[in-house]
Amino acid sequence: MDEIKIGLVGLGTVGSSVLKMITENSHKVQNITGRNLSIKTVVVRNVAKHQQEVPEGVTVTDDLTAIVDDPEIKIVVEVMGGVHPAKEIITSLLKAKKHVVTANKDLIASAGEELAVIAKQNHCDLMYEASVAGGIPILRTIVTSFAADYITEVKGIVNGTTNFILTQMQRKHWSYDQALMKAQELGFAESDPTNDVEGIDAAYKMVILSQFSYGTHIKMSNMSVEGISTIQQEDVQQADAFGYTIKLLGISRRIDDGVFAEVGPVLVPQDHPLATINNENNAVMVTGKAVGETLFYGPGAGGLPTANSVLSDIVSVTKNIVLGTTGNGFNNYQSQVGKVDPKNVIYPYYLSLKMLDAPGQMLKFTQIMTQIGASFSQIVQTKNDDQTARVVIITHEMSKAQLNDLKTYLSKVNTMSLLAAYKVL
Ligand SMILES: NC(=O)c1ccc[n+]([C@@H]2O[C@H](COP(=O)([O-])OP(=O)(O)OC[C@H]3O[C@@H](n4cnc5c(N)ncnc54)[C@H](OP(=O)(O)O)[C@@H]3O)[C@@H](O)[C@H]2O)c1
């Protein structure tokens, strides 16, 4: 049987699971593709650390040219992470006519289009199923199973670390700091958790999901991105009392002729499917004009689940090699969309305010709401230990433009401050 040799760049959590899966599942893959796949060379930084982790016959090196210059290696898996030097490495691999599979969302969100062009010029495949929601096969599903449907919204829980932290805050009544510490202890959060907890990782994934769903590239700089590090236990309990669970959601929606995308904490009704996604799990909800609402659920990270997505790409590339159809692009949908006016982005909001506990303050706040043309459906006031009160409100539907006006008005009032403003689903 013909052999296809694979190069692996990175042998950490994902890389070592890719090696394990290729070795253990080779029989099934052979059966499907008609090719015998095996890893020939692994590139890492620290060769001594990894020498014992590979089966006999596999070369471990810190020299990338061992892969780039090896004509026998046809497919390379990049699982080292980060934008640089991963971008330069993938570029040189594509120029050396190697097909590339990567799990690198940071890189694909920032330079995916550029790399796709280089891949096409060199008649190579560039696939990255594992870059969004780890083990959930969502990108290929959008490409193939939603190919003819008009997607109107894609939203979901696309970061396992933050979902784990929020689940602990809700179930155990822990503070954000306590829950983060537990996540770090269990390996669900990195020692520097900024990318996860500030919503940046989720935003990368929403950029990629939007590209697949609407054929358009949304710049990170055009997205509002808020994380979970300022969520207080009081907010979690208050949301619960109102019948909601706080989740960090990525939302990308067609509005008029444009696409609006945002990442931030959202109050999700407790009977909504997304409210039931707990711990490190992820879920992506895709709404199509024809199909309606669909939900894809599974592990958003972890070595083997992510390796499963990497392997599905390797199998797809292998089939393309066999059929002579490489270089076609993972996602070929291209479309122009306009900008969305903040006046047309409408949601109810959860507002948490700290205000001086004195007569006339609520009246002042109500006057501001009237001035911006907004109103509220629920309100709860509790006294703080000092001379202030915490006022929590669920508004009726209001626009993002009205919310911006509210923030401007409140910034000029020195007896009240807005602690949180979260969308309500
Ligand atoms: N972990 C997950 O659950 C998960 C889920 C989805 C996507 N991803 C993505 O998958 C990628 C890999 O993640 P991971 O968790 O497996 O990372 P990891 O455990 O930190 O492993 C990174 C590997 O890359 C190697 N490496 C780093 N810089 C290198 C360089 N300049 N040259 C050669 N090798 C280098 C490291 O070698 P040394 O060990 O010698 O330092 C290590 O073996 C990232 O893009 C990540 O975002 C991960």
Image: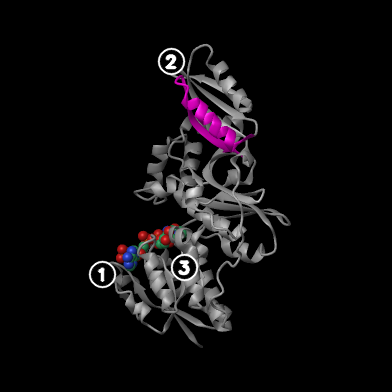
Residue at the spot 27% in from the left edge and 67% down from the top edge: 46
Q: In the image, residue 20 lies at what x, y percent?
A: 43, 70
Q: Residue furthest right?
A: 290
Q: In the image, residue 329 lies at what x, y percent?
A: 55, 71
Sequence order check: which comes first, mark 1 or mark 2? 1
Q: Mark 1 near ligand 1 (CB under 8 Å)? A: no
Mark 1 surroundings within 10 Å by alpha-carbon count, few (fewer than 14), some (14 through 19), many (20 or more):
few
Mark 1 vs mark 2: in front: 2
Residue at the spot 54% in from the left edge and 34% down from the top edge: 404
Q: Is 284 placed above or below 87 here?
A: above
Q: Which residues are magenta?
A: 398-425
Q: Residue furthest bottom?
A: 1
Q: Residue furthest top?
A: 359
Residue 387 numbered tag: 2
Q: Amino acid at mark 1?
A: Ala
Residue 48 numbered tag: 1
Mark 3 vs mark 1: in front: 3
Q: Is residue 424 magenta?
A: yes
Q: Amino acid at mark 3?
A: Leu
Cα gap from disc 2 to disc 3, whole angstroms = 57 Å
Mark 3 surroundings within 10 Å by alpha-carbon count, few (fewer than 14), some (14 through 19), many (20 or more):
some
Where is mark 3, residue-wise? 115
